[in-house]
């Protein structure tokens, strides 16, 4: 199982589980990044960090360190 | 005591058109104030078209009611009736984006768990087009009325108001879409059992506590017994995570199952993606960012200038006209130099403030401001600053006052305060006349070297501000950088809605005038009095009125008047203070004359030039390019006949001005934005100490090395 950091760009993957600090993780869960949800890394910011994600039709930005806490499998 | 007025909460995710809806529902009578204790805008206004008197209160944009900070806590406090309005709302309007339906309704589920009667205002249904969910089916699934609205066109508003009134007449009944597990059930019961009187008895409130209360949270007013019950119920972090998993999964399962089929596919984000491909591109994105920031900077720095000049001109003439019609004396001086000049010194901030709020409003509304944080996070976070702090810091090059006001675009108090603490270090435009005067008068060098020195002052101030942010965020517990969740939405690009932006611009600016303006005015008058009284000239002073009357030429009369003004200033309380602090500032290379200049500059740094003009008897109506003052400064001799102001003194003084918080307006606006005297006092103290120490080091080391 890989993390979102290793996921290919612009390709949907499926969330397996979300780790990380409690408040951060709860925010992602509340936004609908639930296990089983599709997520795609759209691009990386010009300076290398953060990442831009698409979840349920919404675009979010999270940092690399946090993307490394989101475990995914290929769709 | 009269019963508190019934009120309606307007809640919703950010970027769902909530502000437009609020404006449409309250018309022109909505007003902005602050929530007590925290600086979060509180918008409220009477609900237009309602048959009973109802106040609509805009709950700050939120994705969820669970909170970690005092700001996030506002929403739940309001909805529980523990907030500013004293009782729970009669009903909640959930502003739901039709293109983001499930996420918008997550908040609705939380409100329904609390038992609040709800109405869904379905916005963006025009953007959702054919994919727009059918209101009737949605209403049946949600168990509350659903009204599609297009707020800017006024469509659906009467139906929405009628639905609100029907909801407000209902009895609150909690409604849950998921069933807590036995473990969670026991934890909820334990929290409810431990709650003191006055804390809500509902399961939803207990769940809120289980999810929000944790070690190191920044919540206020949570009873100790509730905290203890939460700590007892959740043995470790894993238990807390399990609660989060269960609650979020329970709601999302319902949303996916019931709402998913109704909310046909989300519209393609192709337009936003096309724009993002350019604006977030590795190279193009950075270039576009530099371009946007350049426009922002130029507008504050250069384009606001004519308006600032006009304000100064108007108040100058107003003062002149007033002086013409009034008998000379203390009253005329007070009104002209104290009151009129003081009001002028407040109004003079308006051009920059209006421009900054306009630009920020446009950037926020079109969706770019969120991208500023995305683009700049990598750089800003090395200094523990929020990505959005970039805009206030850049604005600080023009003026710290609008820059401090612009920190409101950051949600977290810690991010805002840290930014406020370093923004006043940026080289603001008020420092430029001081630098220009000192460089031109005292530093014998080619024009190129002088220009380089000016550039050097900019680099110095930027470096100091960034280092200060890093140091303060490590040294001060309230500003310490915790591992903050950095999860921001990058909303779809949209054309900004100018009426909303303009209204917000005006509301924020007028709030500045009301709250910070009064303090600035009071300080201006106090400072004027300090440099004006006492009126008696010292014994042995020349009889100026007689001499002026006998003066043979206009020039001689002007010289005499300037000499009188200089003598009066020296003997004013402020002048005496300048003498008194001379021993303290002597090691920095300053004499009492500069001491008076520094005191006077507290009104605004550029006033230093005019004060020095009066001190040196060349009059106060001069600017930094005036040759007479430059000559006087260059020719000034110490008691031993050496030059009083060497290039080293000039450098020391410039560094003092770069670092010291010589600006009461900045302090006034920081007081307003932080809601107390603690932070402005800290700001003033740390900057003054820093200025003193660095100027001292520069002057003393410079002397040891044989300069000056």
Image (cartoon, rainbow, N blue to C red):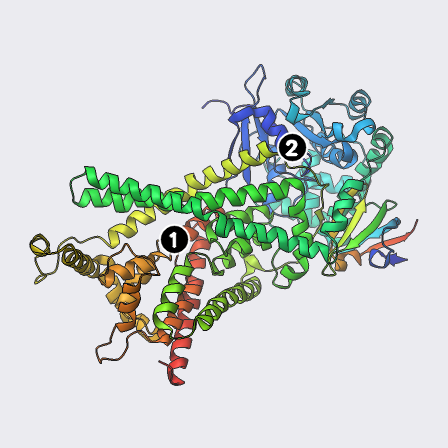
> Above or below — where is B239 with respect to B598?
above
Q: In this view, does B537 lie to the left or right of B314?
A: left
Residue drawn at (16%, 53%) of the image: B535
Q: Is residue B347 visible?
A: yes
Circle 2 chain: B
Residue B520 location, x and y as percent? 37, 47
Res B267 → quadrant = top right
Q: In this view, does B147 lie to the left or right of B621?
A: right
SS under mark 1: helix
The numbered dot on residue B664 is 1
Q: In this view, does B480 lie to the left or right of A75?
A: left
Residue B531 location, x and y as percent? 24, 55
Residue sticking out furthest to the right: A75
Res A48 → quadrant = bottom right
Res B111 → quadrant = top right
Q: Mark 2 points at which residue?
A: B18
Around disc 2, counting alpha carbons within 10 Å, would you say few (fewer than 14), some (14 to 19), or many (20 or more)? Answer: many
The numbered dot on residue B247 is none
């Amino acid at each position: 199982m890989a993390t979102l950091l290793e996921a290919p760009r612009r390709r949907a993957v499926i969330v397996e589980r979300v780790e990380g600090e409690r408040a951060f993780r709860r925010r992602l869960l509340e936004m609908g990044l639930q296990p089983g949800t599709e997520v795609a890394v759209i691009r990386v910011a010009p300076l290398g960090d953060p990442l831009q994600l698409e979840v349920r039709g919404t675009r979010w930005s999270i940092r690399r360190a946090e993307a490394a806490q989101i475990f995914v499998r290929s769709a | 005591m009269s019963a508190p007025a019934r009120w309606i909460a307007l809640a919703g995710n950010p970027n769902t058109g909530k502000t437009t809806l609020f404006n449409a529902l309250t018309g022109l009578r909505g007003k902005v104030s602050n929530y007590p204790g925290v600086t979060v805008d509180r918008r409220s206004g009477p609900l237009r078209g309602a048959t009973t008197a109802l106040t609509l209160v805009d709950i700050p944009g939120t994705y969820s009611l669970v909170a970690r900070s005092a700001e996030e806590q506002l929403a739940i406090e309001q909805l529980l009736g523990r907030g500013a309005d004293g009782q729970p709302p009669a009903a909640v309007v959930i502003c739901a984006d039709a293109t983001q339906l499930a996420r918008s309704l997550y908040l609705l589920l939380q409100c329904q768990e609390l038992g609040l009667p709800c109405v869904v205002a379905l916005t963006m249904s025009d953007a959702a087009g054919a994919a727009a969910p059918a209101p009737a089916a949605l209403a049946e699934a949600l168990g509350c009325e659903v009204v599609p609205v297009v707020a800017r066109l006024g469509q659906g508003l009467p139906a929405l108001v009628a639905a609100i009134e029907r909801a407000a007449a209902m009895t609150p009944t909690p409604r849950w879409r998921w069933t807590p597990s036995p473990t969670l059930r026991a934890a909820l019961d334990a929290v409810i059992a431990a709650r003191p009187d006055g804390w809500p008895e509902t399961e939803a409130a207990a769940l809120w506590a289980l999810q929000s209360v944790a070690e190191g949270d920044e919540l206020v007013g949570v009873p100790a017994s509730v905290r203890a019950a939460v700590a007892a119920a959740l043995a470790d972090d894993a238990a807390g995570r399990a609660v989060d998993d269960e609650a979020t999964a329970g709601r999302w399962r319902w949303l996916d199952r019931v709402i998913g089929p109704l909310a046909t596919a989300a519209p393609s984000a192709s337009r936003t993606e096309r724009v993002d491909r350019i604006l977030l591109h590795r190279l193009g994105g950075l270039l576009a960012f530099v371009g946007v920031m350049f426009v922002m900077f130029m507008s504050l720095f250069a384009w606001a200038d004519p308006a600032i000049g006009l304000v100064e001109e108007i108040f100058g003439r107003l003062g002149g006209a007033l002086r013409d019609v009034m008998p000379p004396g203390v009253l005329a001086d007070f009104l002209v130099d104290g009151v009129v000049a003081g009001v002028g010194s407040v109004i003079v901030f308006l051009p920059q403030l209006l421009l900054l709020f306009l630009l920020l409003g446009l950037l926020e509304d079109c969706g770019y401001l969120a991208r500023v944080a995305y683009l700049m996070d990598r750089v800003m976070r090395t200094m523990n600053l929020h990505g959005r702090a970039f805009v206030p810091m850049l604005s600080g090059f023009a003026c710290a006052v609008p820059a401090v006001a612009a920190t409101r675009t950051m949600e977290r108090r810690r991010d805002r305060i840290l930014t406020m603490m370093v923004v006043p270090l940026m080289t603001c435009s008020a420092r430029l006349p001081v630098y220009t005067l000192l460089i031109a008068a005292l530093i014998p060098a080619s024009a190129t070297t002088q220009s380089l020195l000016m550039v050097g002052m900019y680099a110095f101030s930027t470096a100091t501000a960034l280092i200060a942010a890093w140091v303060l965020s490590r040294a001060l517990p309230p500003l310490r950088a915790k591992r903050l969740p950095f999860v921001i939405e990058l909303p779809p690009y949209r054309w900004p809605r100018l009426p909303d932006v303009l209204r917000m611009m005006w509301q924020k600016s007028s709030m500045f005038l009301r709250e910070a303006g009064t303090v600035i005015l009071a300080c201006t008058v106090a400072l004027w009095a300090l440099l004006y009284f006492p009126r008696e000239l010292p014994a042995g002073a020349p009889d100026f009125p007689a001499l002026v009357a006998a003066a043979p030429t206009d020039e001689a009369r002007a010289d005499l008047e300037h000499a009188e003004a200089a003598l009066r200033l020296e003997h004013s309380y402020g002048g005496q203070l300048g003498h008194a602090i001379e021993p303290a500032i002597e090691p920095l290379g300053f004499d009492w004359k500069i001491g008076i200049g520094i005191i006077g500059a507290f009104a605004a740094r550029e006033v230093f030039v005019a004060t020095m003009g009066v001190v040196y008897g060349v009059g106060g109506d001069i600017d930094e390019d005036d040759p007479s003052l430059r000559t006087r400064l260059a020719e000034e001799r110490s008691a031993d006949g050496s030059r009083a102001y060497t290039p080293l003194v000039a450098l020391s003084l410039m560094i003092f001005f770069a670092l010291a918080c010589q600006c009461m307006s900045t302090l006034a606006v920081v007081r307003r934005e932080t809601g107390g005297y603690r932070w402005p006092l800290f700001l003033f103290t740390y900057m003054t100490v820093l200025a003193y120490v660095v100027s001292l080091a520069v002057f003393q080391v410079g002397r040891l090395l044989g300069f000056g």
